């Protein structure tokens, strides 16, 4: 009998085109998502070398990073953004790549539309010029972010030169408590292993708490795997995966579906497969999480206080904490629930899916956004926006004082006009609290959608479990 | 196309901070471009300039001794965060050809090699020594000899470093990955044929 393999190894081994003597692998790429920010220089490279896109049928383009989330019928004011968007439109047309353009109902954040369209499938290798490509691993797809030179390499050859990743398994045992979500799980994981803890690994998530998550929740967990340093996160495909994908526009149909599903059932890691590293968390120990600093590893339970630099043993970490507290304008020992906020943002590839908007509406229902707080809800795609409107979620949120926006990356990285002003503080469902991420000198606290809304309606960071 | 990297002698600038992320290296407002060039003037923008656009005197690359630095010596986990290749493009456009740290984020690390930048991983004790060397301002001249995989400090002290053979080969010869892969076009054709019969739904 063959040696037991992990999910990662099964996918990797079926995608080898060539292996060099030094172990560098040429791997085949089944699916490639492209967006306007990291692709123009790649197309320019193709044009310069007289190369074509090898498999336009396995490539899907979308405009997500630069787009305004306000009225789309007006011309885009930012000239540079307009040039970048027009370049994307021109490149996709010239090279024969399907594009979900700004006015397409299917337009949205690339990591949301891939699964939504059934473009993302188990057992595939999927790449994009975006680090949050890890999201797609929720379907048992090996999915990772690449740079623009690699985008060009994939466009030209449908392959990549890579060294295999090591295997890590993170098991979250038991049941999550009330008010504790997938976002809290991944923030707790990052707090546990650190922002470089996963460097060089593909992380497979397992255990009862992961199995119990919806596909949306699994996507949230895999999405922030890169914030733990690992390029790829994976969850074994199961009934929920198949149910989610069945009938999606780009999913296999009829006999092809039967064949695919039978194959997908062989993908989960074999009993006895070995991992280079194992980490176990107990779901019951995880409270709603919130970040206090400028790295996603700067995270505590909402019930805790801002730490002191002296709480860290490593001098480099002490120095980093000191700088983070200064930037965030926070003092050690301040209870997290005493921190007032100016903005709340629900959206991004981390938390811009229908389940996230439902969670936001549930907390917002019958409450209103606190005075002085600006609160945005930015659905991850046009289809999610439409669904949320049909379910009545948009009305609940608008009535509560939230701004209901058009889909895009928005205030997660503030490349479009949605910015947190200097010195202002935002409870955000996005994935990075880096300095200046949401706008120059903005301050970010990463939280789940329910926690972001709890902060919006109380005007300060709040334990959503205390809102009755 | 890519500039070869064989030997580099230059000033090493110290950035003794952990987790220098790609948003710090080149903030998002400068990603709205369809070019690779011209990003150097905005490298480390938020650390390098104040709100009025004036240079922050204390910032290492604004100090006279380091304005022409070609090497950076930095703390753990350099280049974490986004996949933006604008980060190595900005470093290169500024004139940085080599970054030395204890560890790098995976995507950034790969991106460096596509642009003729050498990222060197060293054990903490070797990094500490180079950080000390780099603190000496204009006297912090360091030589990186890629072929022999050795760094020579201002006092003539040597530090060896490891590097994947294939990555080194490409850097030393300035090789374009796509050209190399195209030599395997037959194998890619064969793979696609096999995939069509084994996994026809793709």
Image (tube, grey):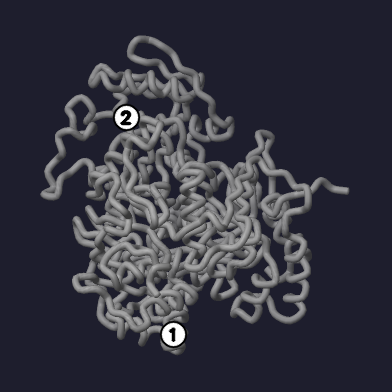
Q: Position of residue A283 (x, y in %)?
A: 57, 57
Could you say which quadrant of the image residue A78 lies in? Answer: bottom left
Q: Position of residue A340 (x, y in %)?
A: 24, 61
For this orientation, the residue located farthest to the right is A1
Residue A96 in view in this figure: no
Residue placed under numbered mark 2 in the picture: B70
Residue at the spot 30% in from the left edge and 70% down from the top edge: A456
Q: Secondary structure at mark 2?
A: loop
Q: Position of residue A326 (x, y in %)?
A: 23, 44
> Which quadrant, please, contains the C terminus of chain A?
bottom left
Nearer the observer: mark 2 or 1; the answer is: 1
**Relative depth, front residue between A241 and A331:** A331
Q: CA distance from mark 2 to mark 1?
A: 52 Å
Q: Position of residue B16 (x, y in %)?
A: 32, 30
Residue placed under numbered mark 1 in the picture: A386
Q: Secondary structure at mark 1?
A: helix
């Amino acid at each position: 009998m063959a040696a037991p393999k992990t999910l990662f190894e099964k996918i990797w081994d079926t995608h080898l085109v060539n292996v060099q003597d030094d172990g560098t692998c040429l791997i085949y790429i089944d699916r490639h998502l492209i967006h306007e920010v990291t692709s123009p220089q790649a197309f320019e490279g193709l044009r310069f070398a007289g190369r074509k896109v090898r498999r336009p049928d396995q490539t899907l383009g979308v405009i997500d990073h630069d787009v305004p989330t306000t009225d789309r019928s007006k011309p885009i004011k930012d000239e540079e953004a307009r040039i970048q968007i027009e370049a994307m439109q021109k490149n996709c047309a010239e090279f024969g790549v399907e594009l979900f353009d700004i006015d397409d109902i299917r337009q949205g954040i690339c990591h949301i539309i891939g699964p939504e369209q059934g473009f993302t499938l188990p057992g595939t290798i999927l790449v994009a010029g975006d680090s949050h490509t890890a999201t797609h691993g929720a379907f048992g797809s090996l999915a990772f972010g690449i740079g623009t030179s690699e985008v060009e390499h994939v466009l030209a050859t449908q392959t990549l030169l890579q060294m295999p990743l090591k295997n890590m398994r993170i098991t979250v045992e038991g049941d999550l408590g009330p008010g504790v979500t997938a976002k809290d799980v991944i923030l707790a994981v990052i707090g546990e292993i650190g922002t470089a803890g996963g460097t060089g690994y593909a992380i497979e998530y397992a255990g009862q708490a992961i199995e119990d998550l919806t596909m949306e929740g699994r996507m949230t967990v895999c999405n922030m795997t890169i914030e733990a340093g690992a390029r790829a996160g994976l969850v074994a495909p199961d009934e929920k995966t198949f149910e989610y994908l069945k009938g999606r526009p780009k999913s296999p149909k009829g006999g092809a579906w039967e064949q695919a599903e039978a194959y997908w059932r062989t993908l989960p890691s074999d009993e006895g497969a070995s991992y280079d590293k194992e980490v176990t968390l107990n779901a019951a120990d995880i409270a709603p999480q919130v970040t206090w600093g400028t790295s996603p590893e700067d995270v505590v339970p909402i019930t805790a206080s801002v730490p002191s630099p002296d709480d860290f043993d490593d001098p480099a970490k002490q120095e980093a904490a000191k700088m983070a507290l200064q930037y965030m304008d926070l003092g050690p020992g301040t209870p997290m629930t005493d921190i007032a906020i100016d903005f709340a943002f629900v959206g991004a590839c981390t938390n811009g899916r229908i389940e996230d908007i439902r969670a936001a509406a549930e907390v917002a229902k019958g409450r209103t956004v606190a005075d002085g707080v600006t609160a945005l809800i930015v659905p991850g795609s046009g289809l999610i926006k439409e669904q949320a409107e049909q379910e009545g979620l948009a009305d609940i949120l608008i009535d509560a004082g939230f701004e209901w926006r058009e889909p895009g990356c928005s205030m997660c990285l503030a490349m479009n006009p949605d910015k947190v002003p200097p010195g202002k503080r935002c409870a955000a469902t996005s994935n990075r609290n880096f300095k200046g991420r949401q706008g120059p000198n903005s301050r970010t606290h990463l939280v789940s959608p329910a926690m972001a809304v709890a902060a919006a309606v109380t005007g300060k960071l709040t334990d959503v479990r205390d809102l009755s | 196309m890519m500039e070869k990297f064989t030997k580099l002698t230059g000033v090493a600038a110290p950035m003794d901070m952990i987790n220098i992320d790609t948003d710090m290296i080149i903030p998002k407002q400068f990603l709205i471009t369809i070019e690779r060039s011209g990003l150097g003037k905005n490298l480390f923008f938020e650390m390098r300039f104040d709100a009025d656009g004036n240079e922050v005197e204390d910032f290492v690359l604004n100090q006279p001794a380091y304005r022409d630095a070609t090497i950076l010596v930095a703390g753990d986990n350099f280049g974490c965060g986004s996949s933006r290749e604008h980060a190595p493009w900005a470093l290169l456009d500024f004139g940085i050809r080599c970054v030395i740290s204890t560890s790098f984020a995976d995507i950034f690390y790969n991106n460096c090699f596509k642009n003729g930048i050498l990222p060197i991983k060293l054990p903490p004790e070797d990094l500490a020594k180079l950080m000390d060397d780099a603190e000496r301002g204009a006297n912090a001249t360091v030589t990186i000899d890629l072929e022999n995989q050795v760094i020579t400090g201002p006092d003539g002290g040597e530090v060896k470093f490891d590097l994947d053979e294939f990555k080194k080969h490409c850097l030393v010869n300035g090789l374009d990955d796509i050209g190399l892969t195209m030599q395997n076009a037959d194998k890619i054709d064969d793979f696609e044929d096999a995939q069509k019969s084994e996994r026809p739904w793709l």
